[in-house]
Image (cartoon, rainbow, N blue to C red):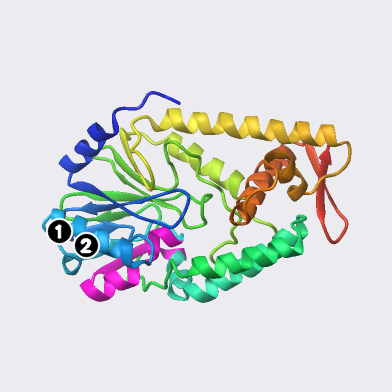
């Protein structure tokens, strides 16, 4: 791990710039989500936390510590479509009357959250079948997804955001960039004057953001399988080239003082994992499904992790296929891979 500045020092710097981390509980293994209160005009909250009474209660307490209440919020910013980031948006909007800003492509998806999640689950089930995940496990994952959906909710976006433009507050302008990969809607906000980047889950310090197999927002049943890890790597490369970034405020965990070092570590990790999958295919001597490879790498994982591991394996397979080291074989039912 690269040397990073003490997190408390970085958070103090953000606070001096009027940006305060409000960490809220989530039901997920990643732990708390970092929402950010920007004390500016309008009073702005970046991300809302999951749709839960506990998260709302803690948000109210943290706002009170800053001398605010939910009703004072004037602008809510959604960085991307995941449940722990948009779940409370509708409740906060109703109570405060705040505007809601999000990537323009996310507007219809957020407006009909239930239908979007149903379509995504159906597509995930199709992908799992095509890549060897057994029917009983697919059924269990569908049940888990139904439970998890309750942590999210629809949101009405009143201020669509266009990449390449700015979100202008009284004392700052935040440059908007679309960085798909972790999700199709990942959006980052750069305060160039203060050299601060609000990265949400696009870049996290201690863990690599999973490039989850998710269909595009405008095509929830695509004919071609998405390749989110390749997309995410392109997004990371674009962020690596950004100048005037000395502090990255992340969606989970600690802030980052050296994003280039973190990104370089990620690329090295992707190369290493792709190499491991290539060696597993060589050792197998016959074509393997993505599920076969996941079992070889991690054994019997928890039901809730099965789709995550499928996303991980297929992401690195996509690297190997891109580099002509692995080829795909499709018998019409299950897709398998072998060494080129």
Near-viewer residue (191 or 68): 68
Q: Position of residue 263 (x, y in %)?
A: 48, 33
Residue at image position (77%, 34%) is 280
Q: Position of residue 53 (x, y in %)?
A: 32, 67
Near-viewer residue (108 or 89): 89
Q: Residues within 10 Å of mark 1 (few under 14, many from 20)?
A: few
- In the image, residue 102 above or below residue 318: below
**In the image: residue 208, left or right of residue 222:** left
Near-viewer residue (308 or 317): 308
Q: Are marks 2 and 1 in contact (CB under 8 Å)?
A: yes
**In which quadrant of the rendered view does residue 279 lie?**
top right
Q: Residues within 10 Å of mark 2 (few under 14, many from 20)?
A: some
Q: Is residue 161 visible?
A: no
Residue at image position (35%, 27%) is 4
Q: Quadrant of the N terminus?
A: top left
Q: Which stretch did the figure color magenta? A: 83-105
Residue at image position (50%, 65%) is 148
Residue at image position (82%, 49%) is 336
In the image, residue 89 lies in the stretch drawn in magenta: yes
For disc 1, the marked residue is 64
Say which element carries label 2: helix
Say which element carries label 1: helix
Q: Is residue 310 visible?
A: yes
In the image, residue 213 lies in the stretch drawn in magenta: no
């Amino acid at each position: 791990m690269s040397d990073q500045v003490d997190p408390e020092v970085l958070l103090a710097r953000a606070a001096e710039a009027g940006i305060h981390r409000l960490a809220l509980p989530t039901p997920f293994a990643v732990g708390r989500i970092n929402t950010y209160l920007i004390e500016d005009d309008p009073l702005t909250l970046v991300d809302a936390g999951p749709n839960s009474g506990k998260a709302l209660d803690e948000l109210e307490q943290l706002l009170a510590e800053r001398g605010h209440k939910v009703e004072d919020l004037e602008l809510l910013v959604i960085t991307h479509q995941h449940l722990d980031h948009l779940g409370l948006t509708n409740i906060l909007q109703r109570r405060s009357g705040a505007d809601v800003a999000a990537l323009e492509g996310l507007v219809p998806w957020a407006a009909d959250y239930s239908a979007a999640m149903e379509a995504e689950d159906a597509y995930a089930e199709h992908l799992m079948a095509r890549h060897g995940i057994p029917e009983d496990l697919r059924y269990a994952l569908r049940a888990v997804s139904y439970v998890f959906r309750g942590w999210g909710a629809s949101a009405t976006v009143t201020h669509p955001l266009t990449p390449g433009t700015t979100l202008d507050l009284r004392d700052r302008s935040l440059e908007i960039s679309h960085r798909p990969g972790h999700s199709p809607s990942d959006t980052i906000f750069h305060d160039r004057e203060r050299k601060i980047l609000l990265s949400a889950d696009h870049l996290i310090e201690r863990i690599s953001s999973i490039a989850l197999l998710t269909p595009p927002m405008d095509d929830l049943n695509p004919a071609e399988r998405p390749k989110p890890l390749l997309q995410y790597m392109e997004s990371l490369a674009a962020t690596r080239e950004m100048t005037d970034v000395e502090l990255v405020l992340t969606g989970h965990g600690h802030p980052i003082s050296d994003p280039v070092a973190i990104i370089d570590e990620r690329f090295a990790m992707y190369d290493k994992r792709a190499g491991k999958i290539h060696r597993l295919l060589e050792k197998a001597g016959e074509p393997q499904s993505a599920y076969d490879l996941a079992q070889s790498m991690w054994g019997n994982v928890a039901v809730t992790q099965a789709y995550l591991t499928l996303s991980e394996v297929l992401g690195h397979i996509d690297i190997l296929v891109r580099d002509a080291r692995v080829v795909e074989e499709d018998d019409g039912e299950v897709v398998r891979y072998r060494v080129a």
